[in-house]
Amino acid sequence: MNVHDFHIDPETLHETPDHPAELATWLDEQRPDDHHSWSAVGLAARLLRRLDQAEDAANRALALRPTTAARLRRAHVLQWQGRFPEANAEFEACLADAGDLLDYAHQHAGKCHYDQGRWDLALEHFHKALRLRTTPDLVASTELAIDAADACLTAATTATELHRLVPAVHRASGPRVVARITDRPPHLGLLADLASLLVTGPVPRETARNLHRYTADIDTHHTQLAEAGWLTSTPDEVTATPRCLPVLHLVNEVHAEVATTFWPTPIPIPIQVDHPMAKATTGPSPAAHLFDQLRALRHHRADAHAHAWSAEGLTAQEMQDLPADTPTRIRIEATTNRLASRPYRPLTRESRTNLITALRTLADKSTEPT
């Protein structure tokens, strides 16, 4: 057993130690005194995410032998610490003087951009590394990185289309619902978002909350709807009352009508998404089914975003107030796209490209003459 053995996480592209306990024991026993031993300690500390220790070891190794390889190892530590401007500058310097290590420099510069959610730049470096590599293991590692970055780029690009298409159906549907409704509930927009789930039975309370996680008083809204006779609400679930069901059916009918006018020739969506909204049914028409698929993908991404900011210890309000150029925000957005990329990963890169192209053909307004 080699305690330094590791594997590459296909989603983060970070190395993960195969024997973390044994590696930690080995690291604690070391007393490095030369370039090689400091380099080995730095690698072990980074794999174990003892990043301050890894930085110290990398600096000592670099001072003893200022090689490109040592600079790359130090830049890798800076990357994992989230010190991206420093890491980017170090990788760029290494690329200018990499020599025989040029493929490694491109590979690791690409991974640094990958951690920042700069998928196009990551892909540029990965493709350059691939053209330089011939060893099967190294080729496979770069091909894994290319596929991961392409899936994340697909998630980010698709998100733009989802944010364009789904709200457009809601905006066009609102006035039609209001014009046709006879018994109007409070918080009609909230019910409209839940309509395709509520018509089939109870909805888990957590799902109902998550669909409106940026509405600070969502529980109050549920309570008001329950007190007015539109929902029954328990700590575990919300259920539409008989009074509410006609409104929900009307909302679904209008959503289906609007979707059909927008997309008279719906496109196929060749993926399944693991999200409660994947069970939603707006209507039997192909356009209504497409609307359900697009909403499920959009909410899947919203959940990925929430997972990313909550992992950073933030609340929904703190996330909304977070400036765009902070290291924390960069990590959150990159993590969001990595998580959101999961439904797209089983697709070939050609299929991902075709999906994006097809989404861009979909209208966000009615194709019917006025």
Image: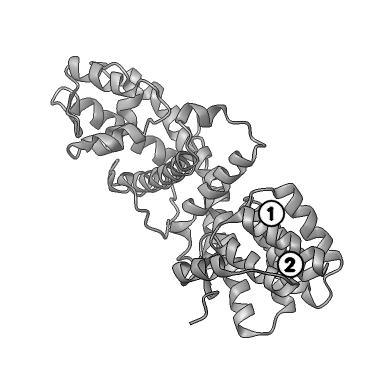
Number of the label disc, if any, that sits on residue 106: 2
Q: CA distance from mark 1 to mark 2?
A: 16 Å
Q: Note whether 153 is above or below 125 in the view shown.
A: above
Q: Note whether 167 is above or below 17 in the view shown.
A: above
Name the residue type under label 1: Leu
| Relative to 211, 226 lies left or right | left
| Relative to 286, 38 lies left or right | right
Count of numbered tags: 2
- Residue 213: horizontal and vertical position, in percent? 39, 31
* Residue neighbourhood size for the residue with mark 1, other residues' Cα within 10 Å, grouped as few (<14), some (14–19), many (≥20): many
Q: Nearer the viewer, residue 11 or 255?
A: 11
Q: Nearer the viewer, mark 1 or mark 2?
A: 1
Tell me, yes or no, if residue 230 can be seen here.
yes
Secondary-structure class at tag 2: helix
Number of the label disc, if any, that sits on residue 78: 1
Tell me, yes or no, if residue 122 can be seen here.
no
Residue 99: which quarter of the image?
A: bottom right
Q: Note whether 83 is above or below 11 in the view shown.
A: above
| Relative to 270, 5 lies left or right | right
Name the residue type under label 2: His
Q: Which residue lies at the image location 32% right of the left edge and 21% below the top edge?
A: 188
- Looking at marks 1 and 2 on the same chain, the residue that comes earlier in the sequence is marked by 1
* Residue neighbourhood size for the residue with mark 2, other residues' Cα within 10 Å, grouped as few (<14), some (14–19), many (≥20): many
Q: Nearer the viewer, residue 181 or 207?
A: 207
